[in-house]
Amino acid sequence: MTIKTALLAGAAAAFMTAAPALAQETTPAPAAAPAAAASSQQSLSLNPGSSVSGPDGELGKLEGVQNNAEGKQELTVRGADGQLRAVPLSGIRQEGTGVVVAYTKAEFDAAAPIAGAPAAPAADPAAAPAPTAEPAAEPTDPATTEPATPAPDSASPAPTEPQ
């Protein structure tokens, strides 16, 4: 009986130590795949007024984002000429505070302006045309002008009506 007991005890011990290893899954956890995909995606900061550049130089300033006729998103960029044009998002990446796209300056200049786009706002008030000034009035002689009516003295008490 001792041999049977020792054999059964050994088998039970072997089974108990092997059970956690047998209970583990052999396939990777599905949560690991989305985490890897999320880490490979890039985050962009698109702020109106930031610089948009192509491989051969600056295209203009970012105005916003719109959907084109095909339903794809594209940037709206105001060029140096003041025209608002659409820029495809292909090859977009962040570089500092600006954005770089795979759209050349020649392609941007050849693109048709967006119909019905508002005109460019005046960026610098100093650059705006100054209003025409009227000719200065002739200086007048202070001796010939009448003095202005003096304002009532605030230190003197106001007249009161008898009660």
Image (cartoon, rainbow, N blue to C red):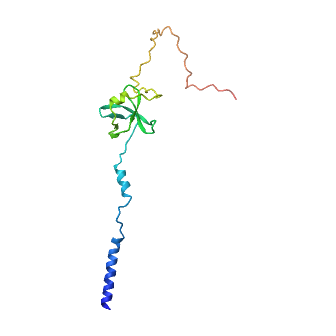
Most distant residue in the bottom direction: 1
Q: Nearer the viewer, residue 100 or 7?
A: 7
Q: Position of residue 101 (x, y in %)?
A: 34, 37
Q: Position of residue 50 (x, y in %)?
A: 37, 35
Most distant residue in the front direction: 70
Quadrant of residue 75 in the image?
top left
Q: Residue at x 31, y 85 (%)?
A: 7
Q: Name the image quarter holding the N terminus.
A: bottom left
Q: Is residue 25 above or below residue 2?
A: above
| Total labels drawn | 0
User: Quick check: 10 left or right of 83?
Assistant: left
Quadrant of residue 78 in the image?
top left
Q: Residue at x 53, y 15 (%)?
A: 148
Q: Position of residue 117 (x, y in %)?
A: 46, 29
Q: Is residue 139 above or below residue 129?
A: above
Quadrant of residue 91 in the image?
top left
Q: Position of residue 156 (x, y in %)?
A: 57, 25
Q: Nearer the viewer, residue 106 or 162?
A: 106
Q: Residue at x 31, y 82 (%)?
A: 10
Most distant residue in the right direction: 163
Q: Is residue 91 above or below residue 58?
A: below
Q: Nearer the viewer, residue 99 or 150?
A: 99
Q: Name the image quarter holding the C terminus.
A: top right
